[in-house]
Image: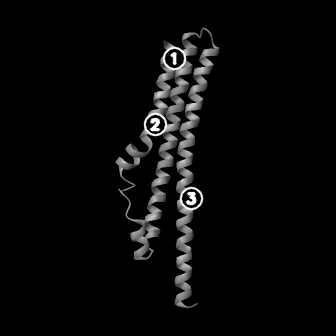
């Protein structure tokens, strides 16, 4: 195989890997939104279930609040796992883009920050999702014990 053919094959392989990794990132981000939305839906269902129980006992109230917090904690753990996957995908994109031409690297620009840093990883991306879930859980506690 000629060097030109090898170069073309590597370029095609890089394009394919880049596209697959970019698709993975979109999938993980959609999954993070879905986890947050479904957690909120379950927390809203708890509020609705509380309204069905006209006079819940103290034990039933405690169980409803505990379920809301278990949902928020489980959602948080799942979001963190997805965020780790997202960081790995970002690292793959950086590695793949190192094989691009100088023009392509300049067109893509450098990422605005280190995707593996705690600040970007936690505070910027998933903290809002986590806050929304725990605010929902505290809202359930307030509704149940008011």
Query: Which of 141/124 is in front?
Result: 124
The image quadrant where one finds the N terminus is bottom right
Residue at image location 47% in from the left, 48% down from the top: 83
Question: Mark 2: few, some, or many residues within 10 Å (few <14, many ≥20)?
Answer: many
Residue on which disc 2 sits: 130
Q: Which percent across, then down, holds residue 28?
A: 54, 51
**Distance of mark 1 from mark 3, alpha carbons?**
41 Å
Q: Residue lying furthest bottom in this view?
A: 2
Q: Are marks 2 and 3 in contact (CB under 8 Å)?
A: no
Query: Vertical placement of 130 versus 1: above or below?
Result: above
Q: Which residue is mark 3?
A: 23
Residue 106 position in % (x across, y down): 39, 70
Which residue is under mark 1? Answer: 143
Query: Considering only order in the chain, which callout, 3 or 2, is on the residue closer to the N terminus?
Result: 3
SS assignment at label 2: helix
Q: Is residue 117 left or right of residue 96?
A: left
Tag shown at residue 16: none
Q: Earlier in the sequence, mark 1 or mark 2?
A: 2
């Amino acid at each position: 195989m000629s060097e030109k053919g090898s170069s073309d094959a590597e370029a095609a392989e890089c394009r394919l890997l880049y596209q697959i990794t970019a698709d993975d990132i979109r999938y993980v981000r959609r999954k993070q939104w879905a986890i947050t939305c479904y957690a909120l839906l379950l927390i809203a269902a708890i509020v609705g279930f509380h309204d069905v129980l006209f006079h819940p006992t103290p034990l039933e109230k405690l169980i409803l609040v505990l379920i809301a917090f278990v949902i928020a904690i489980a959602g948080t753990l799942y979001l963190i796992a997805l965020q780790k996957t997202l960081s790995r995908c970002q690292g793959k994109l950086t590695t793949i883009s190192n094989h691009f031409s100088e023009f392509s690297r300049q067109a893509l620009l450098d990422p605005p920050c280190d995707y593996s840093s705690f600040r970007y990883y936690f505070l910027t991306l998933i903290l809002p999702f986590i806050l929304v879930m725990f605010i929902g859980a505290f809202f359930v506690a307030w509704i149940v014990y008011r």
